[in-house]
């Protein structure tokens, strides 16, 4: 059973609810299935735009999220996975690791595409990449007021730990 799926039938577009893929195919509908791909520096502008649309508050486009910083992070091994529908970037997840623990960062889905399972799809892709690197511990930092993300990661099997997170920054931009 499919909870929701974008489908195009007889010139119209709708979200099919409580339908199976075979129901849609047999009725002559074209299913739109977003695709995953690794993103690079050429995708930078689309990534920043998506993060802004998704409401990521911790973004620092003049500092740690600048084009130059992003290019350096990619060169150092950071991976960014994108989810696209018809060439439009609708979701991202950034993966980093310290050789023992994998970090899930910047999991973002465009507001128009939420509640369709895309965040879970991106998370699964990130975890698969980390497993391929022989990393078995996955971690995420979530802002205390972001209850939606806390609930999502809890549903996905992540556990909350009582940890105090401290940083020292050279400037507010980093």
Image (cartoon, rainbow, N blue to C red):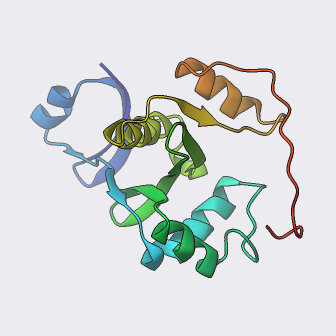
Count all numbered tags in the image, as a single digit. 0
Q: Position of residue 56 (x, y in %)?
A: 71, 54
Q: Nearer the viewer, residue 17 or 172?
A: 172
Q: Which residue does the image show at 35% across and 37% down from the upper left?
A: 128
Determine whether 99 is above or below 58 in the image. Answer: above
Q: Quadrant of residue 134?
A: top left
Instruction: Tell me if 94 is positioned left or right of 166 in this view.
Output: left
Q: Nearer the viewer, residue 62 or 111?
A: 62
Instruction: Tell me if 13 is positioned left or right of 71 in this view.
Output: left
Instruction: Tell me if 144 is positioned left or right of 157 in this view.
Output: right
Q: Nearer the viewer, residue 87 or 108?
A: 108
Q: Position of residue 60 (x, y in %)?
A: 75, 67
Q: Position of residue 173 (x, y in %)?
A: 83, 70
Determine whether 157 is above or below 86 in the image. Answer: above
Q: Quadrant of residue 38?
A: bottom left
Q: Which residue does the image show at 74% across and 21% down from the upper left?
A: 161
Q: Which residue does the image show at 86% across and 32% down from the upper left?
A: 164
Q: Position of residue 90 (x, y in %)?
A: 48, 56
Work out which quarter of the rendered image holds the C terminus and state it.
bottom right
Work out which quarter of the rendered image holds the N terminus and state it.
top left
Q: Which residue does the image show at 33% across and 57% down from the upper left?
A: 37
Instruction: Tell me if 38 is positioned left or right of 47 in this view.
Output: left
Determine whether 70 is above or below 27 in the image. Answer: below
């Amino acid at each position: 059973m499919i909870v929701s799926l974008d489908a195009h039938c007889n010139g119209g577009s709708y979200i099919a609810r409580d339908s199976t893929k075979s129901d849609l195919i047999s009725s002559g509908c074209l299913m739109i299935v977003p695709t995953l791909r690794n993103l690079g520096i050429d995708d930078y502008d689309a990534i920043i735009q998506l993060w802004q649309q998704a409401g990521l508050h911790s973004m620092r486009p003049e500092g740690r999220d600048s084009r130059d910083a992003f290019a350096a992070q990619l060169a150092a091994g950071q991976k960014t996975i994108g989810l696209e529908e018809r060439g439009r970037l609708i979701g991202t997840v950034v993966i980093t690791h310290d050789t023992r623990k994998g970090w899930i960062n910047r999991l973002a889905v465009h507001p128009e595409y939420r509640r369709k399972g895309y965040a879970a799809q991106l998370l699964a892709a990130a975890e698969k990449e980390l497993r391929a690197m022989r990393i078995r511990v996955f971690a995420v930092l979530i802002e205390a007021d972001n209850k939606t993300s806390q609930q999502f990661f809890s549903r996905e099997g992540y556990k909350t730990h009582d940890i105090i997170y401290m940083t020292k920054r050279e400037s507010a931009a980093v």
